Amino acid sequence: MSISIIIWSNISRQQYLQGLTDKQLCEILGVTSRTLYNYRQDPSALTMKQVQLVLDKMGVDMEALLLS
């Protein structure tokens, strides 16, 4: 399993735990719903800048994300 899949899986888990809709996650990432769908199919397209944006908005640090 690649690191991008692990990161995306944990972002999805945090999205669920925090009750964020897909629309809200799209707004945080600055992407369309189609791009969000593409990330779910191939999370390697997600940039570290976008990951950091999500972490900042969710109040989660990278270590906690990787360990969750």
Image (tube, grey):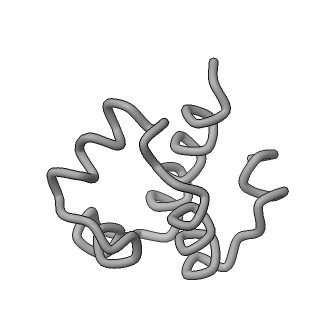
Answer with left or right where residue 31 lies relative to residue 65: left
Q: Residue at x 32, y 74 (%)?
A: 30
Answer with left or right where residue 42 lies relative to residue 35: right
Answer with left or right where residue 50 lies relative to residue 60: left
Coordinates of residue 15 in the picture (x, y in percent): 46, 61
Say if 12 sits above or below 21 in the image: above
Answer with left or right where residue 39 lies relative to residue 16: left
Q: Residue at x 34, y 38 (%)?
A: 40
Coordinates of residue 23 in the picture (x, y in percent): 22, 70
Q: Which residue is at the front of the view, 57 or 14? A: 57
Q: Residue at x 45, y 57 (%)?
A: 16
Coordinates of residue 3 in the picture (x, y in percent): 67, 33
Could you tell me how many numbered marks the image carries?
Answer: 0
Q: Residue at x 60, y 47 (%)?
A: 10
Coordinates of residue 65 in the picture (x, y in percent): 72, 54
Could you say which quadrant of the image residue 25 lies in?
bottom left
